[in-house]
Amino acid sequence: MITLEHVTKKFPGSKTPAVSDFNLEIKKGEICVLVGPSGCGKTTTMKMINRLYEPSIGNIYVNGQDIMDINPIKLRRGIGYVIQEIGLFPHLTVEENVATVPRELKWPRDKIKKRVEQLLRLVGLDPEIHGKRRPPSLSGGQQQRVGVARAMAADPPVLLMDEPFGAVDPITRGRLQNEFLRLQQHIQKTIVFVTHDIDEAIKMGNKIVAMREGKLVQYATPDELLSTPKDDFVAKLVGRNRSIKRLHLIRAEAALQKSIACANLNDSVNKIKKYIKDNPMNVVFVVDDQKRLQGVISEKDMEKNGALDNPQNAIAADLFTDLANFSHHDSTLNDVLSVMLNYGEGYVAIIDEKERFKGIITLGDILEVVKSNANSA
Protein backbone atom coordinates (compact mmCIF):
# COMPACT_ATOMS: atom_id res chain seq x y z
CA MET A 1 0.00 0.00 0.00
CA ILE A 2 2.83 2.43 0.93
CA THR A 3 6.39 1.92 -0.28
CA LEU A 4 9.48 4.06 0.32
CA GLU A 5 12.51 3.24 -1.83
CA HIS A 6 15.92 4.70 -0.94
CA VAL A 7 14.31 7.91 0.29
CA THR A 8 16.56 10.72 1.50
CA LYS A 9 15.52 14.16 2.68
CA LYS A 10 18.10 16.91 3.12
CA PHE A 11 16.94 20.38 4.07
CA PRO A 12 18.76 23.45 2.69
CA GLY A 13 21.59 24.56 4.95
CA SER A 14 21.76 21.27 6.83
CA LYS A 15 25.00 19.26 6.77
CA THR A 16 23.31 15.92 7.39
CA PRO A 17 20.11 14.45 5.94
CA ALA A 18 16.98 14.43 8.12
CA VAL A 19 16.17 11.05 6.54
CA SER A 20 18.76 8.88 4.86
CA ASP A 21 18.37 5.99 2.37
CA PHE A 22 15.07 4.94 3.92
CA ASN A 23 13.35 1.77 2.67
CA LEU A 24 9.97 0.65 3.97
CA GLU A 25 6.91 -1.27 2.81
CA ILE A 26 3.59 -0.98 4.67
CA LYS A 27 0.84 -3.43 3.83
CA LYS A 28 -2.81 -2.52 3.35
CA GLY A 29 -4.75 -2.31 6.63
CA GLU A 30 -1.66 -2.17 8.87
CA ILE A 31 -0.80 0.35 11.55
CA CYS A 32 2.90 1.12 11.13
CA VAL A 33 4.36 3.10 14.01
CA LEU A 34 7.49 5.23 13.62
CA VAL A 35 9.23 5.57 16.97
CA GLY A 36 12.50 7.06 18.12
CA PRO A 37 14.04 10.02 19.95
CA SER A 38 13.31 13.64 19.03
CA GLY A 39 14.99 14.68 15.78
CA CYS A 40 15.34 11.14 14.42
CA GLY A 41 13.27 11.88 11.29
CA LYS A 42 9.89 10.34 12.23
CA THR A 43 7.68 13.29 11.32
CA THR A 44 9.82 14.19 8.28
CA THR A 45 9.35 10.66 6.94
CA MET A 46 5.61 10.82 7.47
CA LYS A 47 5.26 14.26 5.90
CA MET A 48 6.99 13.08 2.75
CA ILE A 49 4.18 10.57 2.18
CA ASN A 50 1.66 13.37 1.53
CA ARG A 51 4.28 15.73 0.02
CA LEU A 52 4.24 18.28 2.82
CA TYR A 53 7.95 17.66 2.34
CA GLU A 54 9.25 16.32 -0.93
CA PRO A 55 12.03 13.71 -0.95
CA SER A 56 15.45 14.89 -2.11
CA ILE A 57 16.25 11.42 -3.45
CA GLY A 58 14.21 8.25 -3.85
CA ASN A 59 10.65 7.29 -4.59
CA ILE A 60 7.45 6.97 -2.54
CA TYR A 61 4.47 5.00 -3.80
CA VAL A 62 0.94 5.05 -2.43
CA ASN A 63 -1.28 2.31 -3.77
CA GLY A 64 1.19 1.70 -6.59
CA GLN A 65 1.38 5.33 -7.74
CA ASP A 66 4.48 7.48 -7.46
CA ILE A 67 3.40 10.43 -5.33
CA MET A 68 5.45 12.82 -7.50
CA ASP A 69 3.13 12.01 -10.40
CA ILE A 70 0.07 13.11 -8.38
CA ASN A 71 -1.06 16.69 -7.88
CA PRO A 72 -0.14 17.42 -4.23
CA ILE A 73 -3.57 18.87 -3.41
CA LYS A 74 -5.30 15.82 -4.87
CA LEU A 75 -2.86 13.55 -3.04
CA ARG A 76 -3.56 15.19 0.33
CA ARG A 77 -7.31 15.03 -0.16
CA GLY A 78 -6.92 11.28 -0.47
CA ILE A 79 -4.84 10.94 2.71
CA GLY A 80 -6.27 11.66 6.16
CA TYR A 81 -4.01 13.66 8.49
CA VAL A 82 -4.29 13.85 12.29
CA ILE A 83 -1.84 15.86 14.39
CA GLN A 84 -1.23 16.36 18.12
CA GLU A 85 -2.46 19.96 18.00
CA ILE A 86 -5.62 18.66 16.26
CA GLY A 87 -5.85 21.80 14.10
CA LEU A 88 -9.63 22.24 14.20
CA PHE A 89 -11.00 25.54 12.93
CA PRO A 90 -12.24 27.27 16.11
CA HIS A 91 -14.78 29.47 14.29
CA LEU A 92 -16.49 26.49 12.61
CA THR A 93 -18.87 24.05 14.26
CA VAL A 94 -17.94 20.41 14.75
CA GLU A 95 -20.10 19.47 11.76
CA GLU A 96 -18.41 22.09 9.58
CA ASN A 97 -14.95 20.93 10.65
CA VAL A 98 -15.67 17.31 9.78
CA ALA A 99 -17.19 18.34 6.45
CA THR A 100 -14.11 20.33 5.32
CA VAL A 101 -12.73 17.93 2.70
CA PRO A 102 -16.11 16.67 1.36
CA ARG A 103 -17.07 20.33 0.77
CA GLU A 104 -13.83 20.91 -1.13
CA LEU A 105 -14.61 17.81 -3.19
CA LYS A 106 -18.06 19.33 -3.89
CA TRP A 107 -20.04 16.41 -2.50
CA PRO A 108 -23.83 16.89 -2.50
CA ARG A 109 -25.10 18.53 0.69
CA ASP A 110 -27.21 15.56 1.78
CA LYS A 111 -24.29 13.16 1.26
CA ILE A 112 -22.04 15.39 3.40
CA LYS A 113 -24.64 15.58 6.17
CA LYS A 114 -25.08 11.80 6.22
CA ARG A 115 -21.31 11.21 6.26
CA VAL A 116 -20.71 13.71 9.08
CA GLU A 117 -23.41 12.14 11.26
CA GLN A 118 -22.07 8.66 10.54
CA LEU A 119 -18.51 9.61 11.48
CA LEU A 120 -19.44 11.47 14.67
CA ARG A 121 -21.33 8.41 15.88
CA LEU A 122 -18.42 6.21 14.86
CA VAL A 123 -16.01 8.17 17.09
CA GLY A 124 -18.48 8.22 19.99
CA LEU A 125 -19.96 11.72 19.65
CA ASP A 126 -23.70 12.38 19.35
CA PRO A 127 -24.34 14.61 16.29
CA GLU A 128 -27.40 16.12 17.98
CA ILE A 129 -25.40 17.12 21.06
CA HIS A 130 -21.97 17.93 19.63
CA GLY A 131 -22.56 18.78 15.96
CA LYS A 132 -23.45 22.45 16.45
CA ARG A 133 -20.83 23.12 19.12
CA ARG A 134 -17.50 24.79 18.40
CA PRO A 135 -14.14 23.19 19.25
CA PRO A 136 -13.25 25.49 22.20
CA SER A 137 -16.30 24.17 24.09
CA LEU A 138 -15.12 20.54 23.80
CA SER A 139 -12.72 18.63 26.02
CA GLY A 140 -9.30 17.69 24.66
CA GLY A 141 -10.41 14.10 24.12
CA GLN A 142 -13.56 15.21 22.27
CA GLN A 143 -11.55 17.54 20.04
CA GLN A 144 -9.20 14.69 19.21
CA ARG A 145 -12.17 12.52 18.18
CA VAL A 146 -13.41 15.31 15.91
CA GLY A 147 -9.92 15.48 14.38
CA VAL A 148 -10.02 11.75 13.63
CA ALA A 149 -13.52 12.07 12.15
CA ARG A 150 -12.39 14.96 9.94
CA ALA A 151 -9.40 12.94 8.71
CA MET A 152 -11.73 10.12 7.67
CA ALA A 153 -14.44 12.29 6.14
CA ALA A 154 -13.68 11.54 2.47
CA ASP A 155 -12.99 7.87 3.34
CA PRO A 156 -9.26 7.98 2.47
CA PRO A 157 -7.45 4.63 2.34
CA VAL A 158 -4.45 6.09 4.22
CA LEU A 159 -4.25 7.96 7.53
CA LEU A 160 -1.17 9.80 8.78
CA MET A 161 -1.21 10.35 12.55
CA ASP A 162 1.48 12.52 14.15
CA GLU A 163 1.49 12.15 17.96
CA PRO A 164 -2.34 12.15 17.81
CA PHE A 165 -2.95 11.42 21.50
CA GLY A 166 0.02 13.26 22.97
CA ALA A 167 -1.86 16.37 24.13
CA VAL A 168 -4.33 14.69 26.52
CA ASP A 169 -3.97 13.30 30.04
CA PRO A 170 -2.81 9.68 30.49
CA ILE A 171 -6.24 8.22 31.34
CA THR A 172 -7.95 9.92 28.39
CA ARG A 173 -5.01 8.92 26.20
CA GLY A 174 -5.42 5.24 27.07
CA ARG A 175 -9.16 5.45 26.41
CA LEU A 176 -8.63 7.15 23.03
CA GLN A 177 -6.03 4.55 22.04
CA ASN A 178 -8.46 1.73 22.82
CA GLU A 179 -11.32 3.45 21.02
CA PHE A 180 -9.17 3.99 17.97
CA LEU A 181 -8.02 0.36 17.88
CA ARG A 182 -11.69 -0.72 18.07
CA LEU A 183 -12.46 1.70 15.26
CA GLN A 184 -9.60 0.34 13.15
CA GLN A 185 -11.18 -3.12 13.30
CA HIS A 186 -14.10 -1.65 11.34
CA ILE A 187 -12.40 0.84 9.01
CA GLN A 188 -9.20 -1.14 8.22
CA LYS A 189 -7.21 1.89 7.07
CA THR A 190 -3.50 1.83 6.29
CA ILE A 191 -2.03 4.01 9.02
CA VAL A 192 1.36 5.64 9.57
CA PHE A 193 1.53 6.60 13.24
CA VAL A 194 4.32 8.72 14.76
CA THR A 195 5.14 8.63 18.46
CA HIS A 196 8.14 9.05 20.78
CA ASP A 197 6.51 6.72 23.33
CA ILE A 198 7.65 3.09 23.00
CA ASP A 199 4.71 1.87 25.11
CA GLU A 200 2.27 3.53 22.72
CA ALA A 201 4.15 2.07 19.76
CA ILE A 202 3.93 -1.45 21.18
CA LYS A 203 0.24 -1.05 21.92
CA MET A 204 -0.85 0.58 18.66
CA GLY A 205 1.34 -0.95 15.97
CA ASN A 206 1.07 -4.05 13.81
CA LYS A 207 4.62 -3.14 12.80
CA ILE A 208 7.13 -0.78 14.41
CA VAL A 209 9.94 1.18 12.78
CA ALA A 210 12.69 2.06 15.26
CA MET A 211 14.52 5.13 13.93
CA ARG A 212 17.78 6.83 14.81
CA GLU A 213 19.43 9.82 13.11
CA GLY A 214 17.23 9.57 10.04
CA LYS A 215 17.79 5.86 9.50
CA LEU A 216 15.65 2.78 9.91
CA VAL A 217 17.32 0.63 12.56
CA GLN A 218 14.74 -2.15 12.94
CA TYR A 219 11.40 -2.94 11.33
CA ALA A 220 9.52 -5.58 13.29
CA THR A 221 6.31 -6.63 14.99
CA PRO A 222 5.92 -5.46 18.60
CA ASP A 223 6.59 -8.98 19.83
CA GLU A 224 9.77 -9.26 17.76
CA LEU A 225 10.97 -5.87 18.96
CA LEU A 226 10.50 -6.92 22.58
CA SER A 227 12.04 -10.37 22.21
CA THR A 228 14.91 -9.69 19.81
CA PRO A 229 16.00 -6.04 19.65
CA LYS A 230 18.50 -5.66 16.82
CA ASP A 231 21.18 -3.72 18.72
CA ASP A 232 21.91 -1.79 21.89
CA PHE A 233 20.07 1.29 20.63
CA VAL A 234 16.82 -0.65 20.12
CA ALA A 235 17.32 -2.47 23.44
CA LYS A 236 17.62 0.88 25.23
CA LEU A 237 14.64 2.26 23.28
CA VAL A 238 12.50 -0.67 24.38
CA GLY A 239 13.84 -0.37 27.92
CA ARG A 240 13.73 -2.75 30.82
CA ASN A 241 10.78 -4.69 32.18
CA ARG A 242 9.90 -6.21 28.83
CA SER A 243 7.57 -8.69 30.53
CA ILE A 244 5.54 -5.71 31.78
CA LYS A 245 5.60 -4.11 28.32
CA ARG A 246 4.21 -7.35 26.87
CA LEU A 247 1.03 -6.56 28.79
CA HIS A 248 0.34 -4.09 25.95
CA LEU A 249 0.02 -7.11 23.63
CA ILE A 250 -2.40 -9.12 25.79
CA ARG A 251 -6.12 -8.43 25.93
CA ALA A 252 -8.01 -8.39 29.21
CA GLU A 253 -9.97 -11.54 28.34
CA ALA A 254 -6.76 -13.59 28.60
CA ALA A 255 -6.66 -13.11 32.39
CA LEU A 256 -10.40 -12.83 33.09
CA GLN A 257 -12.06 -14.59 36.04
CA LYS A 258 -15.51 -15.26 34.60
CA SER A 259 -17.19 -17.26 37.38
CA ILE A 260 -18.04 -14.30 39.58
CA ALA A 261 -21.52 -14.26 41.10
CA CYS A 262 -23.54 -11.07 40.67
CA ALA A 263 -26.52 -9.62 42.47
CA ASN A 264 -29.58 -8.40 40.62
CA LEU A 265 -31.09 -5.07 41.57
CA ASN A 266 -33.94 -6.73 43.48
CA ASP A 267 -31.84 -9.27 45.42
CA SER A 268 -32.26 -9.39 49.19
CA VAL A 269 -29.67 -8.64 51.84
CA ASN A 270 -29.30 -12.34 52.65
CA LYS A 271 -28.42 -13.12 49.03
CA ILE A 272 -26.00 -10.19 48.93
CA LYS A 273 -24.22 -11.41 52.08
CA LYS A 274 -23.80 -14.87 50.53
CA TYR A 275 -22.39 -13.40 47.31
CA ILE A 276 -19.92 -11.24 49.26
CA LYS A 277 -18.77 -14.24 51.27
CA ASP A 278 -18.19 -16.27 48.09
CA ASN A 279 -16.39 -13.46 46.23
CA PRO A 280 -12.59 -13.41 46.68
CA MET A 281 -12.66 -9.60 46.74
CA ASN A 282 -15.33 -9.47 49.50
CA VAL A 283 -17.73 -7.44 47.38
CA VAL A 284 -20.64 -8.22 45.10
CA PHE A 285 -21.22 -6.66 41.69
CA VAL A 286 -24.73 -5.50 40.88
CA VAL A 287 -26.21 -5.90 37.39
CA ASP A 288 -29.56 -5.11 35.80
CA ASP A 289 -31.75 -7.50 33.81
CA GLN A 290 -29.48 -7.10 30.76
CA LYS A 291 -26.39 -7.95 32.88
CA ARG A 292 -25.15 -4.36 32.60
CA LEU A 293 -22.91 -3.39 35.49
CA GLN A 294 -24.58 -0.94 37.87
CA GLY A 295 -22.18 -0.82 40.79
CA VAL A 296 -20.71 -2.72 43.72
CA ILE A 297 -21.69 -3.54 47.31
CA SER A 298 -19.36 -4.24 50.23
CA GLU A 299 -20.18 -5.06 53.85
CA LYS A 300 -19.28 -1.46 54.70
CA ASP A 301 -21.95 -0.28 52.26
CA MET A 302 -24.54 -2.44 54.03
CA GLU A 303 -23.42 -1.26 57.47
CA LYS A 304 -23.57 2.37 56.36
CA ASN A 305 -27.12 1.93 55.10
CA GLY A 306 -28.29 -0.07 58.13
CA ALA A 307 -29.05 -3.11 56.00
CA LEU A 308 -27.38 -5.55 58.39
CA ASP A 309 -29.68 -4.46 61.26
CA ASN A 310 -32.83 -4.32 59.12
CA PRO A 311 -32.26 -6.76 56.23
CA GLN A 312 -35.95 -6.90 55.34
CA ASN A 313 -35.97 -3.19 54.44
CA ALA A 314 -33.29 -3.19 51.73
CA ILE A 315 -32.47 -4.64 48.33
CA ALA A 316 -29.39 -4.39 46.13
CA ALA A 317 -30.78 -1.37 44.26
CA ASP A 318 -30.71 0.59 47.55
CA LEU A 319 -27.19 -0.36 48.53
CA PHE A 320 -24.77 -0.32 45.60
CA THR A 321 -22.18 2.40 45.03
CA ASP A 322 -20.74 3.50 41.69
CA LEU A 323 -17.71 1.59 40.48
CA ALA A 324 -14.84 3.53 38.91
CA ASN A 325 -12.29 0.73 38.62
CA PHE A 326 -13.59 -0.97 35.50
CA SER A 327 -12.21 -1.58 32.02
CA HIS A 328 -13.40 -3.04 28.73
CA HIS A 329 -12.88 -6.62 27.59
CA ASP A 330 -10.72 -5.57 24.64
CA SER A 331 -8.47 -3.33 26.75
CA THR A 332 -4.90 -4.47 27.22
CA LEU A 333 -3.68 -5.88 30.52
CA ASN A 334 -1.49 -2.80 30.80
CA ASP A 335 -4.65 -0.65 30.67
CA VAL A 336 -6.22 -2.84 33.34
CA LEU A 337 -3.15 -2.51 35.56
CA SER A 338 -3.19 1.29 35.13
CA VAL A 339 -6.84 1.45 36.25
CA MET A 340 -6.07 -0.83 39.20
CA LEU A 341 -3.17 1.34 40.37
CA ASN A 342 -5.03 4.59 39.72
CA TYR A 343 -7.94 3.62 41.98
CA GLY A 344 -5.92 1.67 44.54
CA GLU A 345 -7.99 -1.50 44.30
CA GLY A 346 -6.79 -5.09 43.99
CA TYR A 347 -9.17 -5.83 41.13
CA VAL A 348 -10.78 -4.34 38.05
CA ALA A 349 -14.26 -5.22 36.81
CA ILE A 350 -14.43 -6.02 33.09
CA ILE A 351 -17.38 -5.06 30.89
CA ASP A 352 -18.13 -5.53 27.19
CA GLU A 353 -19.10 -2.92 24.61
CA LYS A 354 -22.71 -2.97 25.92
CA GLU A 355 -21.53 -2.46 29.51
CA ARG A 356 -22.41 -6.04 30.47
CA PHE A 357 -20.39 -7.48 33.34
CA LYS A 358 -17.94 -10.17 32.16
CA GLY A 359 -15.85 -10.85 35.28
CA ILE A 360 -12.86 -9.47 37.16
CA ILE A 361 -9.10 -9.33 36.89
CA THR A 362 -7.01 -9.21 40.07
CA LEU A 363 -3.42 -8.12 40.58
CA GLY A 364 -2.59 -11.80 41.08
CA ASP A 365 -4.02 -12.65 37.65
CA ILE A 366 -1.76 -10.05 36.03
CA LEU A 367 1.28 -11.23 37.96
CA GLU A 368 0.64 -14.77 36.73
CA VAL A 369 0.72 -13.50 33.13
CA VAL A 370 3.96 -11.58 33.81
CA LYS A 371 5.51 -14.69 35.37
CA SER A 372 4.40 -16.83 32.44
CA ASN A 373 5.93 -14.37 29.96
CA ALA A 374 9.19 -14.23 31.91
CA ASN A 375 9.46 -18.03 31.96
CA SER A 376 8.80 -18.33 28.23
CA ALA A 377 11.15 -15.49 27.22
Image (cartoon, rainbow, N blue to C red):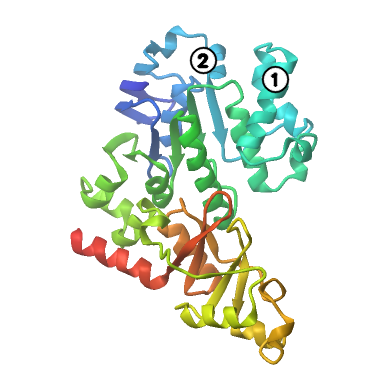
Rendered location of residue 112, percent (x, y): 70, 20
What's the residue at 76%, 34% (across, down)? 131
Relative placement, left or right, of 93 versus 47 is right
Rendered location of residue 102, percent (x, y): 66, 18
Rendered location of residue 43, percent (x, y): 46, 34
Going from N to C along the chain, the mark reached first, 1 or 2, is 2
Rendered location of residue 83, percent (x, y): 56, 36
Asked if 234 appears above or below 58 in the picture, the reply is below
Query: How crowded is the residue under tag 1: few (<14 C-alpha within 10 Å), some, or many (20+)?
Result: many
What's the residue at 31%, 27% (across, down)? 24
Asked if 254 appears above or below 297 in the picture, the reply is above
Q: What residue is shown with label 1?
A: 112
Q: CA distance from mark 1 to mark 2?
A: 20 Å
Tell me the number on the disc at residue 75.
2
Which kind of residue does numbered mark 1 sit on?
Ile
Toward the viewer: 362 or 20? 362
